Image: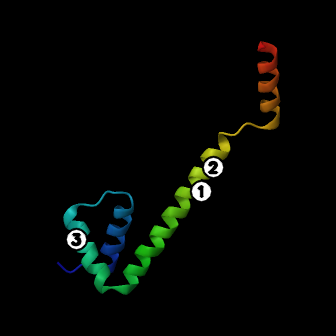
Amino acid sequence: MKLSCDKATTLCDKSQYGEISLWEKIQLNIHLFICKNCGLYSKQNSVLTKCYKKQQAFEKQKSCCLNNNEKDAMEANLKAQK
C-alpha cells in the first residue's frame, strides 16, 4: 500500500483532471498526509491549475469583445434600421 513520491505526483496530476479512482484517491490522501514534499507539490499544482483556468477564461472573454470598428459598424447598422 506504500506509495512512492513519483506515483503520488502522477496521481496528483490525474486528480487535477478528475481521472483518479476512489482507491487511488485514498492512497494519495494518505501519502499527502505523510509526505510534506508531495503535499507542497499538490498545493502548488492546484494554484497553477487555477491560474491557468483564470487565464483561459480571460482569453475567451477577451476574444468575445468587439473592437471599435465592429462597434461602429453595429451602431450604424442599428441606426439604419430605425
- Residue at 28 percent across and 80 percent down: it is 31
For the N terminus, the quadrant is: bottom left
- Residue at 78 percent across and 32 percent down: it is 71
- Residue at 46 percent across and 70 percent down: it is 45
Q: Which residue is mark 3?
A: 26
Would you say 31 lies left or right of 64 here? left
Say which amino acid is labelled 3.
Ile
Query: Residue 48's spot in the image, x, y percent?
Result: 51, 67
| Residue 11 visible to an observer of this rendering | yes
Would you say 60 lies left or right of 37 here? right
Query: Residue 38's spot in the image, x, y percent?
Result: 37, 80
Q: Give the CA separation, mark 1 to mark 3.
A: 31 Å
Q: Give the CA separation, mark 2 to mark 1.
A: 6 Å
Mark 3 residue crowding within 10 angstroms, few (<14) / some (14–19) / many (20+): few
Q: Is residue 71 above or below residue 14?
A: above
For the C terminus, the quadrant is: top right
Q: Which residue is mark 1?
A: 55
Q: Give the CA separation, mark 2 to mark 3.
A: 36 Å
Callout 1: SS: helix
Q: Residue 59, which numbered label? A: 2
